[in-house]
Image (cartoon, rainbow, N blue to C red):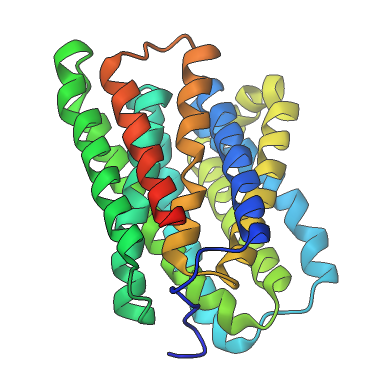
Amino acid sequence: MGVLAASTTQSPSAAVLAATLVAAVLHASWNAIAHWIPDKTASLTIVNLGGLLCAIPLVLVAMGPDRESWPYLAASTALHVAYNCLLMVSYRLGDLSQTYPLARGTSPLVVTLLAAIFLGEMPRPGQIAGVLLVSAGLACLVFWGRRTHPSSPAAVGAAVATGLMIAAYTTVDGIGVRLADSTLGYAAWLMLLEQMAVPTAAFALRGRKLWYEIRPVWHIGLAGGAMSVLAYGLVLWAQTRSALADVAALRETSIIAGALIGTLLFRERFGTARVVATCAVAGGIAVMYLV
């Protein structure tokens, strides 16, 4: 347990902060691309193909991960596939500026609990205060927002389920990458296995018709895939150098970027409830880092 647990008594270093914030922006960007492409199956298929093209050369040059980490790689791959499916459903049912903050904001709460249980990373007072702020923001987003801009219960449920999958694979990868002895090798194999699964399943279900949906947007989707690989690679690196709860919280600053993209590019309504919710979630993340 001791070799796996990172220190929770200090805030993340400047390098961890910078890497995770860059990952957050990249993550919001590729999610915006996935949301923008009308056919959600096609969007996640082409994004995953882009990630696969990036993963192949990394697998060839990186040192392979230690065999102790392979069960975690297998579990994470399954969780990532479930996450992609739930994400696709979330984007089909709801607006980016609502489903994205709800899914991403759920994750740090659960990761904090899982890290304490499985890694002994007990939360600092600032982390606990941040969790409460994030919870208040999510409650505002879900309940208050319904009065002025009703949301589908199915969209809310899918977004929360997506957040639970994010928390699950974040915890699994936090353990796996620390056992791997090669952050790049773990990231490369995870991306290779994960990014193969979604296109394989999609083409099995849709066949050649899927190519016709992909062709007009292939270049944008491939760019999104490259962003996704770089974003999660940075997160995995940060998880080897800081507590999982800190990295999970910092990563979710992508909530702000996602909400702004949804409003500015997709013309989605950004009412009072979403302003308050986004500020509360962002404030909670700041408290978790600073206190």
Tell me: residue 42, above or below residue 80: above
For this rendering, which residue is in front, 223 or 107? Answer: 107
Q: Residue at x 60, y 35 (%)?
A: 30
For this rendering, which residue is in front, 105 or 214? Answer: 105
Question: Residue 216's spot in the image, x, y percent?
Answer: 70, 19
Tell me: residue 6, above or below residue 206: below
Is 111 left or right of 66, judged from the image as shown?
A: left
Q: The C terminus appears in which quarter of the rendering?
A: bottom left
Is 90 left or right of 173, judged from the image as shown?
A: left
Q: Residue at x 33, y 64 (%)?
A: 112
Residue 44: quadrant of the picture: top right
Residue 36: quadrant of the picture: top right
Question: Residue 204's spot in the image, x, y percent?
Answer: 52, 45
Residue 131 visible in this rendered orientation of the protein: yes
Q: Residue at x 73, y 79 (%)?
A: 64
Looking at the image, the residue that sits furthest to the front is: 291
Is 92 left or right of 151, judged from the image as shown?
A: right
